[in-house]
Image (tube, grey):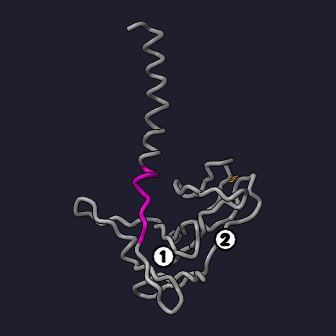
Amino acid sequence: MERRKFIKTCCYSAIGIPIAATLMQSCGGIYYATTNRINGRLAISKSEFIQIKKDKKINRKFVLVRTEALDFPICIYNTGENIYSASLLKCTHRGCELNVGGGIYTCPCHGSEFSITGKVLEGPADKNLMTFKTETDYENIYIYVS
Ligand code: FES
């Protein structure tokens, strides 16, 4: 193999492998949870955050839910011990659906970024995401979605 061709191949591999790993990681983390309506609230069992892989218990950091009332999914993010944040995955710039991964929400349309609690980190969006009040009990997480 020519030296130039070898260097080119190495460079593509060095760039491509981390990108592929990141994409696979973000794709593998998307999970839509089952919900119930309880007293007008959306209820998500805490067990939806547990994943069994090769007999190992893994905690999901977030799950997505869909409701009939909203055109975009809601991301329920576990931000701490029994603390959850619920944000609508609709970009406040021009309404594209956000991606979840790497501990932030990113917009594929023009690059805005939001924290997992819905705060703008990077424009062009200048408004925070729509968020929903959450409560928990021993079994469930409740989201106040009208
Ligand atoms: Fe999200 Fe423009 S629609 S940054």
26 vs 140: above or below: above
Query: What x and y, as percent, mark residue 74?
Result: 55, 69
Q: Is residue 1 above or below residue 142?
A: above
The residue depicted at 71 percent of the width and 66 percent of the height is: 128
Indicate the secondary structure of the residue bearing disc 1: loop
Q: Position of residue 103 (x, y in %)?
A: 54, 58
Above or below, 10 relative to 24: above
Q: Say which amino acid is labelled 2.
A: Met
The spot of residue 27 in percent (x, y) is 43, 52
> Mark number for residue 29?
none
Residue 130's label in the rendered image is 2
Q: Quadrant of the C terminus?
A: bottom right
Q: In x, y percent, where is residue 63?
A: 46, 67
Q: Is the CB of mark 1 within 8 Å of ligand 1?
A: no
Query: Of marks 1 and 2, which one's residue comes earlier in the chain?
Result: 1
In the image, what residue occupies the spot 65% across and 48% down?
Answer: 109
Question: What residue type is disc 1 on?
Answer: Glu
Quadrant hosting residue 57? bottom left
> How far apart, in angstroms, are the residues tagged by discs 1 and 2?
23 Å
Residue at coordinates 47% horizontally, 45% vertically from top-left?
22
- The residue mark sitting in front, 1 or 2, is 2
Q: Residues within 10 Å of mark 1 (few under 14, many from 20)?
A: few
| Residue 90 colored in magenta in the image | no
Question: Residue furthest toward the top?
Answer: 2
User: In this picture, is 110 found above or below 37?
Assistant: above
Q: Which residues are magenta?
A: 25-33
Q: Secondary structure at mark 2?
A: loop
Indicate if the residue with disc 2 has its beta carbon within 8 Å of ligand 1: no
Residue 81 shows which numbered tag? 1
